Each structure stands twice: as structure tokens, then as C-alpha cells.
Amino acid sequence: MTMISQRVALYALAYGLLIWFEATLMIRWMGELIFVSGNVAWTAALFAVTPALVYSIGWFFFSAFQTPRAERAAAAILICATGLLANAAVIGWIDVVLPGLTAGQERLFASWIAWAYGFGLLSGLWPRNLARVPAA
């Protein structure tokens, strides 16, 4: 069993917090434009684009920090765990953190979080080989 290096683990935690913070600010300021509860086509497009966005965020981390294949799954878990824990607090105080969202938009936000972080976890496992990322 391969352990994740301390350097990669710390960078993964910091990166997860940074991504969460940026996404939270973006949703706070533009949430009404991102989560449109009455527009099925827009919602479907949002959910369709999310995997590519999440994979690119994961690939950037793995490439920038030259994360070996054996450490990618653990790094993805740490990145996602940081954001999921922070989003648990956001959902607990959603009226304070994201005051512009309606109840329908809050539900879309919560389901989008699960969708995005699910792909974030998968980004550490698949694809096996990534461009500009160490294979060993």
C-alpha cells in the first residue's frame, strides 16, 4: 500500500479549500444566474458541463504538483473532503452564506454539490494516464 506524501497531502487540503472558497464566492455573487430552477435546459447544461470542469480542476492539481498515479486517489479524496466539509457548513447556514438563493435553487445547489464532488473523487482514479502527469 502506498501512502500519500506529506507534501501532496498538504497541497491537496489547501487546494480543496481554495477551490471551495472560489466556488462559494462565485455562487454567492452569481447563484441566481447559475441555478435557475425553472429552466430544465439550463440545469441540464450545468450538470453536463460540470464533469469536464471538475476533471480539469483535478488534472491541474495532478499536473502542477506532479502527483504520482499511486497518490492521485488519496489526493482527490483530500481535495473533495475539504470542500465537502466546508459545504456542510454552507448548507447549515445557507441563508447567511448564500442569501440570494430561493428554496428551489438551494435544492439544485445541494444536488450539484453531490454531482460535482462525485466526479472530483473519480478524477483521482480515472483516467489512469493523464497528459503531463507522472505515470509512476
Image (cartoon, grey):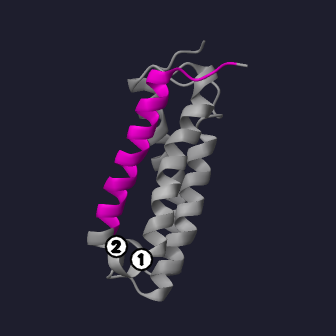
* Residue shown at 52% from the left, 75% from the top: 108
- In three-dimensional space, the C-alpha distance between marks 1 and 2, rounded to whole angstroms, equals 5 Å
Tell me whether circle 1 and circle 2 mark residues in contact (CB < 8 Å). Answer: yes
- Residue at which label 1 appears: 94
Residue 132 rendering spot, x and y as whole percentages: 45, 19
Point out the image quarter for the N terminus: top right
Residue 60 rendering spot, x and y as whole percentages: 41, 33
* Residue shown at 62% from the left, 33% from the top: 73
Is residue 120 visible to us here?
Answer: yes
Amino acid at dot 2 = Val
- In the image, residue 1 lies in the stretch drawn in magenta: no
* Residue shown at 43% from the left, 80% from the top: 36
Point out the image quarter for the C terminus: top right
Does the magenta stretch mainly form a helix, a strand or a loop? Answer: helix
Image: 128 above or below 90? above
* Residue shown at 54% from the left, 25% from the top: 130
Is residue 42 visible to us here?
Answer: no
Amino acid at dot 1 = Ile
The range drawn in magenta is 2-27
Q: Quadrant of residue 14?
A: top left
SS assignment at label 1 = helix
- In the image, residue 7 lies in the stretch drawn in magenta: yes
Image: 68 above or below 119? above
SS assignment at label 2 = helix
Q: Nearer the viewer, residue 130 or 12?
A: 12
Residue 37 rendering spot, x and y as whole percentages: 48, 83
**Of the numbered discs in the image, which one, if any, rests on residue 97?**
2
Residue 114 rendering spot, x and y as whole percentages: 59, 61
